[in-house]
Amino acid sequence: MYTVKNFLDQKIVPWHRILSGRNVIESSFIEHASALELPIENFARKNELVLSALIGCENEATFLTLIRDVYEAGASGILIARPEDTVTLPQKVLDYLDGHPFPVILIPWQIRFADIITAVSKQIQKDSDVQIMQYETIQKRLLETYLSNQDMNCAAQLLADSFMSQILIFDTSGRCKGFSKNFAAEEVSELDQLFFEKEYIIDIKAHERLYGSLYLKPLTSKKLYDESLFFHYLIWPLVLWFDKEWVIQAANQSIKDDFIWRLTKGPLESFETMCEEGQRLGFYLRGSYTCIVGDIYLYSSSDVRANEHWIAPNINLLKEEILRTAHTIHRRVMVTWQKNLLIIYLQSTNGYFQQGIDLFLDKLEKKAGEVFPQIRFTWGISGPGSDPTDFRKCFQDAKFAQELCVNTSAKNTRFTFKNTVVYNIISFLATDSAIHENVKNIIAPLLEYDTATGSSLLETLQCYLDCKNLSEAARLLHLHRQSLLYRINKIEELTGLSLKNADNFFLLEICVRLYANRHK
């Protein structure tokens, strides 16, 4: 790139005197040139060579303001010209420049600023044309490397040689895809540490999709690449490698998806045959698995087409997140997307079945919420499978639970097959007219009281029955314990049933569930 030193070496001005910043002229890049006087305000640009006749710098304070403003704007340097062809920097300016290395250069008065700006602009354009040719050459070599079926290590080495840098290429999961030879093996294995060096990270992104990132660290203190040219010419050839890998993975995943989908329909072959086929695909079918069936929806939209529009580009990323989440809790997992449903077979834990499922879904929902904040899930969960697992029955149980998991809120919801057993019993009882009449007689006094007084005795009863604990119910209802006791006494008075009596407690619980089921 064109620097202040290059400018001085070109002899565009017949003579010059460096007043400060001699040690930084080689690293001060020039991208623009213009004549500026006080006030500078927002007119100076980064990497701009500023020319000034010191108009308005009558004293130390205004001189310091000029130097400080162009320095803070990121200018590459300032050329000063005075009729007397001499300038003495005030002490305040010298003190400032001691802590802020910056080229301040005296040039002849008789040279017109316009001629300097024209010469600098021509040189910048010339250097830009040369740079573009260099980047086009590197681009061509990258494409040749890709077309000759070489891996990303070769691409990384080509870039490392071109920019005298260490190069490491990794995907969105942080997995290393390629690195240059000047990277030690231990540095690659400690990839997490590199993520903290943000100034060396370049995103590999195309068509609003992030494929991965490039770690580019110069071997010298100089930055030897132009970010805009790098993005324009070199990012999309790297994308080709990611796309090629994605096509291969998609083909493999399609075979895996078909196999998992077959599991949900029951074994067409013997279990041993299925185990052998699964093993070739990286699946272990022996042992106990739980099936989880999930529906995905955009909680901000009820448009089915909006859901479908989101699914197509994102479902594979979500499936990858499911695999990673299972890996973090050390569980085998199989996942597929079929008939607009996520189907997951998660290895069951020894004991603590529900805690293991909740841990997995909690972690998955948290991570998915960070990456895809607009989506929500409804989950249906089977019971733990036997050993070996009846994959078909587990899927049917989970799917049935998911179908009953109605969700209209902005929260993720879960429904287990165990819940569906209770649901079936309640649904059966609800069809009996005599039972319905009994429920109505017990609940009616509470409804009438709530309507007349604006109270919420029915809600209070439901919460107490769910908690089975006075203190917990008071906390959830935001009531003082004594206020809750008053409401419970009122409920017992209106229904004629004591909550201290186990039979009465059971009867009230059935009545509330039947009423809720009928009016949901």
Image (cartoon, rainbow, N blue to C red):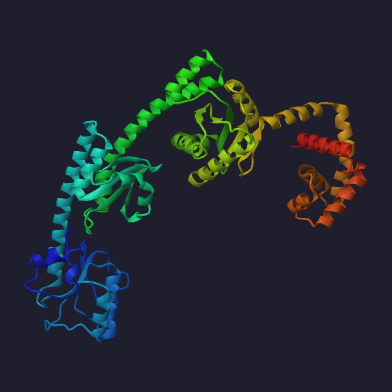
| Quarter of the figure with the C terminus | top right
Does 288 sit above or below residue 307?
above
In the rendering, at what x and y percent does residue 53 appear? 19, 78
In front: 126, or 22?
Answer: 22
In front: 44, or 290?
Answer: 290
Looking at the image, residue 501 sits to the left or right of residue 290; the answer is right
Q: Residue at x 47, y 21 (%)?
A: 278
Q: Residue at x 16, y 59 (%)?
A: 124
In which quarter of the view is residue 478 placed?
bottom right
Looking at the image, residue 146 sits to the left or right of residue 6; the answer is right
In which quarter of the view is residue 22 placed?
bottom left
In the rendering, at what x and y percent does residue 101 appear? 24, 72
In front: 229, or 175?
Answer: 175
Residue at the extreme bottom: 59
Does 62 sit above or below residue 415?
below
Q: Residue at x 38, y 30 (%)?
A: 249
| Quarter of the figure with the N terminus | bottom left
Q: Is residue 265 visible?
A: yes
